[in-house]
Amino acid sequence: MLSQPPRRTTRLQLSDLEIGRTLGTGSFGRVHLVRHKSTGVYWAMKVLRKGEVVKLKQVEHTVNERGILEMLDHPFLVSMLGTSQDAANLYIVLEYISGGELFSHLRRCGRFPNHVAKLYAAEVVLAFEYLHARDIVYRDLKPENILIGSDGHIKITDFGFGKRVPDVTWTLCGTPDYLAPEIIQAKGYGKAVDWYALGVLVFEMLAGYPPFYDEDHFKLYEKILAGKVKWPAHFDPNAKDLIKRLLTADLSKRYGNLKAGVKDIKGHKWFADLDWEKVLQRQYKPAYVPAVKHAGDTSNFDQYPEEREEYGKQGVDPYKDKVGLKILRGVCRGYAW
């Protein structure tokens, strides 16, 4: 069993952490494996360059991400340990999920059998049910943002596009293949966009590619708005029926957005052989359990070029007023920074 962080409040400094290899990169930062020197516990540390956050106008998204992560406590959502910052960077320390990305697993398999896709989808449904009950819209579902734990169950990560939306929002964000029609049309939208994205994910898991694809984003958006899907012959009829009900542009017909809410999805015949309480308790054995040799094993992640810069650098912070992230200090999951 992999070691878990202690639950007591502990004061942490960046100097307490041993910085390991890069697990992933993004447009304004990277994620490292880190090891707590005194306990030997492994975590993942997201490093965001303040200059890039400001330049790419991602301040609001970064603030949203930290605020949302602090609220989360769910078996299928990644947990945050704490946050910090220095003159150049913001740091978010998260639990380390050692099985790698669902994307990598899907790429190796080509496509998933019906029962495999179903369990992954069910776990996403419960994660979204939890988020939506707290008025949080995730807005960035895709296989790259779903991690697989050492037990084979999922953990959704990367809440950079997450936002508390009690009613509607208008921000254009997300991954092109997964954008709901109402986002593309610049209409006010809400939680229903996550259910549309679930339909795209289920299709991609079963087919090996998303339902609408084009290298030209404008043509891709035209296909999404047209909503014409070419269905592979091997699709389970019940899976096809659910996907259709999720991918509809008509919000008055989209599952998850009707009067019964998520109950329409959980009660759909594709999920008929699942007990939702057993799904929540992770009592179904996943078809794929990643090979994890030890707590700090990174073999399930792709290799990335390393750019080692000095973290924890002190000095004048030119972005202090612009970034305005004083909320990054505090106590979360028992760790104070």
Image (cartoon, grey):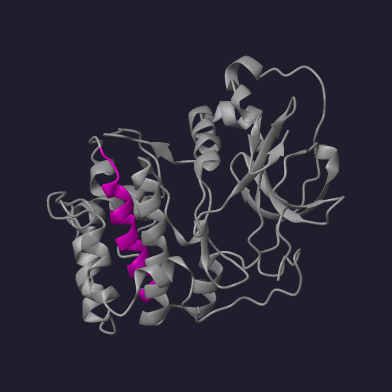
Position of 50 with respect to 310 (left or right) is left
Q: Nearer the viewer, residue 205 or 157?
A: 157
Q: Main secondary structure of the magenta part?
A: helix
Image coords of residue 92 (percent x, y): 65, 40
Query: Does residue 23 lie above or below 238 as drawn?
Result: above
Image coords of residue 218 (percent x, y): 31, 47
Instruction: Locate the N terminus and report the quarter of the image it occupies.
Output: bottom right
Q: Residue at x 30, y 33 (%)?
A: 170
Q: Does the segment drawn in magenta span residue 190?
A: yes
Which of the 4 image quadrants contains residue 298? bottom right
Position of 178 with respect to 306 (left or right) is left
Image coords of residue 16 (percent x, y): 84, 42
Q: Residue at x 41, y 37 (%)?
A: 163
Q: Is residue 104 visible?
A: yes
Query: Does residue 264 lie above or below 60 as drawn?
Result: below
Give the residue furthest to the bottom: 234
Position of 137 with respect to 268 (left or right) is right
Q: Nearer the viewer, residue 44 or 212?
A: 44
Q: Is residue 120 visible?
A: no
Q: Which residues are magenta?
A: 189-206
Position of 311 with respect to 260 (left or right) is right
Query: Does residue 332 lie above or below 274 as drawn?
Result: above
